[in-house]
Amino acid sequence: MKAFLLPLAALALASSALAAPPAKVAVADAWCRAAPAGAMAGGCYVTLTAAADDRLVAVETPAAKRGEIHIMSMDGGVMRMRKLADGIALPAGQAVALKPGAEHLMIIGPKIALKDGAKVPLTLKFAKAPPVTVEAPVRTAVKP
Ligand SMILES: [Cu+2]
């Protein structure tokens, strides 16, 4: 009897693994930094925690011409930023904070005023997990 039941149990396990949805990425603390009227771009920040190893590969928003993933770094005593073409690695279970002075999201050619109280919808795209859309409030001050 035991020999007959075991294969059935194994089959049930295998089929539930197949039906499992892709691991998700949790998105927390999204915000965008207020920018002067007419600014060509603005920075946005989020904390991402992936359930399984993943990558942030793109950001899209209807509130700007396009979104990019950037990093700030010191280059000969000057702060510079550049586009991260490969996005940002998200190790499983580890909170990755995008913040001023480090990795950030850049919205290029904002179509709305980036002032206190405005909201920027951001759709974050991942290599494996389904995309997540959040509303990032615009703030003047850096989050405490
Ligand atoms: Cu930037």
Image: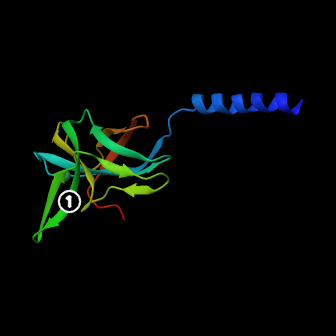
How far from the left and from the top, in percent, is residue 49? Answer: 45, 51
- Judging by the rendered image, the residue that carries numbered circle 1 is 72
Q: Please indicate, yes or no, whether residue 91 appears anywhere in the rendered image.
A: yes
Q: How is the image coloured?
A: rainbow
- Pick the front one: 130 or 66: 130
Does residue 87 appear to the left or right of 19 in the view shown? left
What residue is drawn where x is 83% and y is 27%?
4
Give the residue at the far right of this rendering: 1
Q: Residues within 10 Å of mark 1 (few under 14, many from 20)?
A: some
- Pick the front one: 139 or 10: 10
Mark 1 Cβ and ligand 1 under 8 Å apart: yes
> In terms of secondary structure, where does tag 1 sit?
strand
Does residue 86 appear to the left or right of 90 in the view shown? left
Identify whether 14 is placed above or below 72: above
Q: Image quadrant of residue 131? A: top left
What residue is drawn where x is 44% and y is 47%?
53
- Pick the front one: 87 or 97: 87
Does residue 11 appear to the left or right of 132 in the view shown? right
Give the residue at the far front of this rendering: 3
Count of labels shown? 1
Q: Please indicate, yes or no, whether residue 35 appears anywhere in the rendered image.
A: no
What residue is drawn where x is 44% and y is 56%?
95
How far from the left and from the top, in percent, is residue 40? Answer: 11, 45
What residue is drawn where x is 22% and y is 45%?
85
Q: Amino acid at mark 1?
A: Met
Quadrant of the drawing holding the C terminus: bottom left
